């Protein structure tokens, strides 16, 4: 008899604890999976934005780097985790918009099977090269690559990554689909090899390369945007540098598995917005060349629309791209 009363009491307190957990999100650290190595653009943006989001949430956002397969390994891990708000991911144009066309067997559906939270940063794309590469501007680089494609080593962060995607578009436009390519676990490690001159060039998101360009340890041929980046005012646009047809904007954004409680989604959206409205956080991002997303793109619906828009744009070029 005693046992039964105790059983009921235990069940009741468990049920109450369950309610408290649901209402008290977050009551423990939140894991944010970064699907690339530390030191690359995705990692940098996750750490800057995550820092401030932790303050708003009152719980630490713990960054976990899970690299592999162009970022799809880490995103698969996050999107197949329990949808309780405690596992989210910082993905990007590659993992959310390029991956469906690149990986026919993709284990998550970024178009309809995830919970977008919001865009965290726009990232202009730069064509960068080792500092002692003979070519000194985009025109001579393009001429050299067309003349002797087998002499160039390209770095990227795996099939479907932003670097792979954006250089694949570039090579398609230049008519040189085949180059020697080296896959890294992120463009952080690739950048180290670019600085030391072990690889020749890559296409990458501005936030990790801006400092090195300013320091002169690598060189930038052009930014593939309509306007120059305020963070790198000396780097010409592709239009100014003679390749107007090459324009592409990348971004990083946060999502979690579909089925997350509304309370968790709302709190994460609020924390993201507070981070992007915070002057110090904004400055850290702007100094690296990131673009602060519009209010509309910092919402689940706005970010979901960006993912779909860019997937539709990339799909035809990537489906038949040489691997
Ligand atoms: N920027 C990388 C890419 O090419 C990934 C990274 O290291 O953030 O997708």
Image: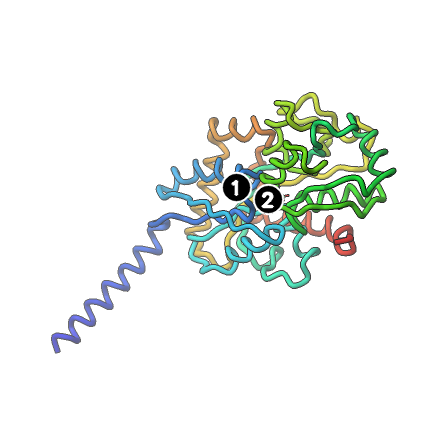
Q: From what the image shows, is residue 147 above or below residue 111? A: above
The residue singled out by tag 1 in the image is 38
Q: Residue at (43%, 37%) from the top-left corner?
A: 51
Q: Is residue 242 left or right of residue 273?
A: right
Label 2 beta carbon within 8 A of ligand 1: yes
Percent position of residue 21, x then y:
32, 55
Per the model, the C-alpha gap separating discs 2 and 1 is 8 Å
Quarter residue 226 falls in: top right
Task: Indicate which quadrant contains ligand 1.
Answer: top right
Percent position of residue 270, x then y:
45, 42
Residue at disc 1, secondary structure? loop
Whether residue 233 is visible to the viewer of this picture, yes or no, is yes
The residue singled out by tag 2 in the image is 186
Q: Is residue 277 left or right of residue 93?
A: left
Q: Is residue 204 left or right of residue 1?
A: right
Q: Residue at (71%, 31%) from the top-left corner?
A: 223
Whether residue 302 is visible to the viewer of this picture, yes or no, is no
Query: Given the current orientation, which residue lies at the most extreme left position?
Result: 2
Query: Given the current orientation, which residue lies at the most extreme right position?
Result: 147
Is the Cβ of the residue at disc 2 closer than 8 Å to that at disc 1? yes
């Amino acid at each position: 008899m005693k046992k039964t009363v105790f059983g009921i009491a235990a069940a009741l307190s468990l049920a109450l604890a369950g309610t408290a957990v649901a209402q008290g999100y977050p009551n423990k650290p939140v894991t944010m999976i970064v699907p690339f190595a530390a030191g690359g653009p995705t990692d940098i943006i996750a750490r800057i934005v995550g820092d401030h989001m932790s303050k708003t949430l009152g719980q630490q956002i713990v960054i976990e780097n899970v690299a592999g397969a162009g970022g799809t390994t880490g995103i698969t891990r996050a999107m197949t985790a329990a949808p309780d708000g405690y596992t989210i991911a910082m993905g990007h144009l590659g993992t959310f918009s390029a991956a469906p066309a690149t990986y026919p067997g993709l284990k998550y559906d970024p178009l309809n099977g995830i919970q977008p939270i919001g865009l965290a940063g726009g990232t202009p794309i730069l064509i960068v090269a080792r500092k002692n590469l003979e070519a000194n501007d985009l025109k001579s680089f393009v001429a050299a690559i067309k003349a002797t494609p087998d002499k160039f080593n390209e770095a990227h962060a795996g099939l479907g990554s932003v670097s792979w995607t954006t250089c694949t578009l570039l090579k398609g436009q230049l008519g040189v689909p085949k180059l020697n390519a080296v896959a890294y676990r992120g463009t952080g490690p690739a950048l180290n090899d670019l600085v030391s001159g072990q690889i020749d060039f890559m296409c990458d998101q501005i936030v990790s390369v801006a400092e090195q360009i300013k320091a002169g340890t690598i060189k930038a041929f052009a930014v593939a945007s309509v306007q120059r980046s305020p963070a790198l005012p000396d780097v010409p646009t592709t239009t100014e540098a003679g390749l107007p047809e090459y324009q592409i904007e990348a971004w990083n954004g946060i999502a979690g598995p579909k089925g997350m409680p509304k309370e968790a989604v709302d709190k994460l959206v609020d924390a993201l917005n507070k981070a992007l409205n915070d002057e110090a956080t904004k400055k850290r991002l702007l100094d690296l060349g990131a673009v602060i997303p519009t209010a509309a793109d910092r919402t689940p619906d706005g970010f979901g629309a960006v993912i779909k828009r860019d997937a539709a744009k990339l799909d035809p070029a990537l489906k038949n791209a040489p691997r």
